[in-house]
């Protein structure tokens, strides 16, 4: 009896080991390899970037060759690329600023309303913060006010003149 059971255990163990070996082998076989069309090296499939258009869903050129190619391309066409990038940035910046200008123009009333409501809601906090800021940055605030006065000298003069004229008219 005892001998039989030993045999049974050995058999199942052997089967297990065999199966494990077979699994490993089939797994190794399942890992596909591909030959790079540029460097000609046989590489593991994950060394190739994916490409849905290709039948095996991977690019023909390996990642290493691709990055080399794109670097080469970049250095060869550096100036043209930089010009294109700059152009794109410029045109899109203009588009965006025009969009915002138009938006502000078309929604003037709404935006004013929103701003007013926001101010009303946060009045206390805004005033408190401004006061605190002023207290903590007295010299800087004075400096800014002085700068503003110098910059707007003519405007202030004109305003004062008009103000006095109006006052004189009322008398
Ligand atoms: Zn390659």
Image (cartoon, rainbow, N blue to C red):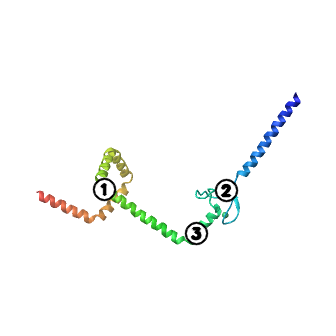
Return the residue at label 2. Answer: 45
Task: Kindly identify the residue that appears in the image at 31 percent across and 52 percent down.
Answer: 111
Specify whether 78 is left or right of 24: left
- Near mark 3 (Cα within 10 A), the count class, few <14, some 14-19 or many ≥20, is few
* Mark 1: secondary structure: helix
Question: Farthest residue in the left direction?
Answer: 171
Query: Counting other residues with Cα less than 10 Å from the Cα at mark 1, is it few (<14), some (14-19), or many (20 or more)?
Result: few
- Decide if residue 124 is on the left or right side of residue 36: left
Viewer-closest of 116 and 14 = 14
Residue 107 located left or right of residue 25:
left
Q: Is mark 1 within 8 Å of ligand 1?
A: no
Which quadrant holds residue 103? bottom left
Quadrant assignment, res 98: bottom left
The residue that appears at 49% across and 66% down in the rendered structure is: 85
First-in-chain label (2 vs 1): 2
* Cα–Cα span, label 3 and label 2: 24 Å
Q: Nearer the observer, disc 2 or disc 1? A: 2
Question: What element does badge 2 sit on?
Answer: helix
Give the residue drawn at x 51%, y 71%: 80
* Residue topped by disc 1: 106
Disc 3 vs disc 1: Cβ atoms closer than 8 Å? no
Horizontal and vertical percent for residue 37?
A: 66, 65
Q: Earlier in the sequence, mark 3 or mark 1?
A: 3
Residue 119 at x, y = what percent?
A: 32, 47
Q: Which residue is mark 3?
A: 73
Q: Secondary structure at mark 3?
A: helix
Left or right of 81 in this view: 100: left
Q: Quadrant of ligand 1?
A: bottom right
153, above or below 108, in the image: below
């Amino acid at each position: 009896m005892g001998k039989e059971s030993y045999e049974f255990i050995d058999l199942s163990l052997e089967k297990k080991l065999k199966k494990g070996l077979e699994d490993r082998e089939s797994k190794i076989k399942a890992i596909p390899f591909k030959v790079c069309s540029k460097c000609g090296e046989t590489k593991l499939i994950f060394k190739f970037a994916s490409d849905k258009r290709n039948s095996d869903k991977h690019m023909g050129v390996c990642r290493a060759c691709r990055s080399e190619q794109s670097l080469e391309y970049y250095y060869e066409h550096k100036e043209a690329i930089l010009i294109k990038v700059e152009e794109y940035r410029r045109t899109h910046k203009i588009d965006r600023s025009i969009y915002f200008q138009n938006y502000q123009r078309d929604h003037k009333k709404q935006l004013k309303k929103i701003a007013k409501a926001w101010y009303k809601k946060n009045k206390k906090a805004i005033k408190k913060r401004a006061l605190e800021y002023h207290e903590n940055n007295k010299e800087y605030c004075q400096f800014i006010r002085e700068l503003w006065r110098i910059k707007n000298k003519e405007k202030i003069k004109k305003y004062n003149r008009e103000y006095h004229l109006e006052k004189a008219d009322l008398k």
